Image: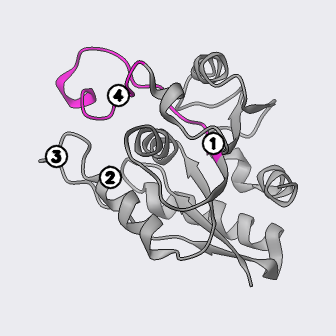
Amino acid sequence: MKKQILFIHGGGEGGYEADTKLVVSLRTELGEAYEVHYSQIHFNDTLPDFGWIKEIGKEISLIKEKIILVGHSFGASMLLKYLSENRIQKKIDGLFLIAAPYWSGDEDWKQGIKLHKSFADRIPKDIQIFLYQCKDDEVVPFDHLKFYAQNLPQATIRKITNGGHQLNNDLSLIAKDIKSL
C-alpha cells in the first residue's frame, strides 16, 4: 500500500500553479511507494480564514489511511492553524512545512488566519514536524522560521542557504526527510 501525502499549496495569485512544480519534484523524488494528493484550494474572501480550514479538513478526510502533510507558504501556515484548532481522528506520520509565514498584526484580513497564542500546545505531540526555509526567500522573511523554531522546539529545522521561496522547485531534501519517517 502506498504511503499517502497531502500537499497544501501556497496562496496568492497563481499559488496553485506555481506549487505544481514542487509537487512534481516531490512525486519524482519519492517514487512509486508514495501517493501525493494535490487539489486546488480556492480563496473565499467572505470568510475570515478564506475558507481554507474547512477545505483542508475535507482534503484530509478524503484520505482513509495514515497521512503525511506537506504545506508550502500560506498552505503551511493554514495546516498549522488547522492542526492546532481541530481534533484529528487519523494518524499523521509527519508534518512538513516549507516557508511558513507567521501572521501577526492588527489588520482585519489577518485576524482569521492568525494562530492562537498557545497553538504549539494544541498540536498533537506524536506528529514529527519538519520546518524548511531558504535564507534568500523573497516572500516570507527568514525570521519567521525563528518564531516557529522557538515555539515548536520538537521540530527538525532545515535552514537552506539558497533556493528562494520556491526552493528552486527542488523538494529532494523534503523527500529525503519523508523517507526517513
Residue at left offset 80%, top offset 69%: 30
Relative image position of residue 35 (x, y in whole percent):
67, 77
Q: Give the answer, above or below, for where 39 lies relative to 155.
A: below
Residue 161 versus residue 156: which sits nearer the camera? 156
Inspect the image, locate mark 3, and give the three-letter code of the amino acid beneath it.
Answer: Leu
Q: Between 126 and 48, which is closer to the camera in this rendering?
A: 126
Among the two numbered marks 3 and 1 on one chain, the one whose residue lies closer to the N terminus: 3
Residues at badges 4 and 2 in contact (C-beta under 8 Å)?
Answer: no
Which sits earlier in the primary sequence, circle 4 or circle 1? 1
Q: Which residue is mark 2?
A: 52
Residue 77, image x and y in percent? 47, 38
Whether 59 is drawn above or below 102: the answer is: below
Q: Quadrant of residue 54?
A: bottom left
Say which element carries label 3: loop
Q: Which residue matches tag 1?
A: 98
The answer to whether marks 2 and 3 mark residues whose Cβ atoms lie closer than 8 Å is no
Residue topped by disc 4: 114
Mark closest to the chain's N terminus, 3 or 4: 3
Q: Which residue is rendered at x = 56% and y = 50% of the image?
A: 71
Q: Position of residue 89 (x, y in %)?
A: 48, 59
The residue closer to the viewer here, 63 or 139, is 63
Mark 4 or mark 2: whose residue is earlier in sequence: 2
Does residue 83 appear to the left or right of 173 in the view shown?
left
Q: Amino acid at mark 1?
A: Ile
> 40 or 86: nearer the eye?
86
- Contact, CB < 8 Å: mark 3 with mark 4? no
